[in-house]
Image (cartoon, grey):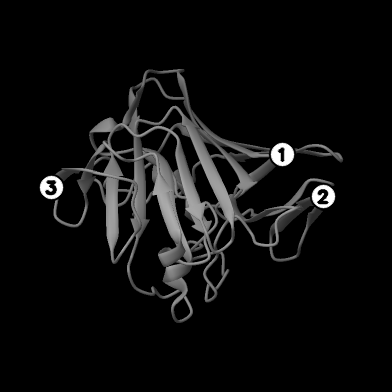
Amino acid sequence: MKISDDGFLQLSNDLAECKISLFGANIVSYRPKNEENDIFWLGDLNKFDNKQAIRGGIPVCWPRFAEEKLNSRLPRHGFARLSAWTVKNIHADKDKIEACLDLIPDEKYQLKATARLLIKITDKLEYCLETANDSEDIFEFSEALHAYFNISSLNETEIKGLAGHRYLSSLDGKTYTMAEDFRIKGEFDAAFLSAGNIEIIDKGFKRIISLKKEGSNTTVVWNPGKDLAEMSPGQYKKFVCVEPANQGESFVRLNPGEKHKISMTVQVRKMA
């Protein structure tokens, strides 16, 4: 284990290596040792100033998603990605890496709930966000594991597992049904209402990224269709966001003392 002066936790063993920013508890890099290319995408023009949210990796959207009315007094996408997290414990040996990070909200947010991030890496990445309601009142929140998956190109990549599922488009507010496995062509931003496991088929990198989730009632798929501030020219074509989430009408409602977990398991295999 090594924590750099700029607040990054770097972990490595015989199977994989990863890099986690303590600002936002964001995994900015994860690469199995048998993979040439990182599993997650990271914007080339990020400032890493511990003020602005990091574009890429897995930002934690909590306890608000996007600009939803629920918890509207909080920042867009919540404050977890804008906060310093504390390392609870770290374990690394040749076959396994485990990390636990905690977030206690700043007093200015007036929120009696805590978040814990549990990361486990073996031959796959297991990533779990646990929310605990520490108050005497009901706590309602939305959340997403805002994963940016690194791909060779949008033109070379197909997303499987969404065909036949209904989705709500954030672009026009209408509900559609995905007819078939699809490639993103242009701006796309939608919440799939019942999707399960996903596969990202990348012919350019000759690999398949599988995503399994638990504790999640929606799956958000997004690409802006253009470069944003943190991206070098054309970099938007090199990622797709596939996000286990509980947002919109599928927000989480916790009674006093209750806990909730949302998790995803990411695994990579070579194409035949």
Depicted 166 relative to depicted 254: above or below: below
Q: Tell me: 132 left or right of 267.
A: left
Q: Nearer the viewer, mark 2 or mark 3?
A: 3
Q: Are marks 2 and 3 in contact (CB under 8 Å)?
A: no
Residue at the extreme bottom: 233
Residue 2 appears left or right of 75? right
Judge from the rendering whether residue 71 lies leftward or rightward of residue 48; answer left or right.
Answer: left
Seen from the viewer's position, the closer of residues 156 and 191 is 156
In the rendered image, residue 184, in percent from the top left (x then y), is placed at 34, 59
Q: Residue at x 26, y 36 (%)?
A: 164
Asked whether disc 1 touches disc 3, contact meaning CB atoms under 8 Å apart, the reply is no
Q: Residue at x 61, y 48 (%)?
A: 272
Q: Residue furthest front?
A: 272
Tag 1 secondary structure: loop
Amino acid of disc 3: Lys
The reply to whether the C-beta atoms of the residues labelled 1 and 2 are less than 8 Å apart is: no
Q: Amino acid at mark 2?
A: Met
Residue 248 visible in the picture: yes
**Which residue position holds label 1?**
123
Residues at marks 2 and 3, CA–CA distance in whole angstroms = 47 Å
Q: Mark 2 — residue? A: 1
Nearest to N terminus: mark 2 or mark 3 = 2
Front in this rendered view, residue 200 or 40: 200
Q: Secondary structure at mark 2?
A: loop
Instruction: Give the image location of residue 162, x and y in percent.
Output: 34, 40
- Name which residue lies at 78% across and 37% down: 96
> How far apart, in angstroms, are the residues tagged by discs 1 and 3?
39 Å
Q: Disc 3 designates what residue?
A: 174
Mark before the other along the chain sequence, 1 or 2 = 2
**Callout 3: SS:** loop
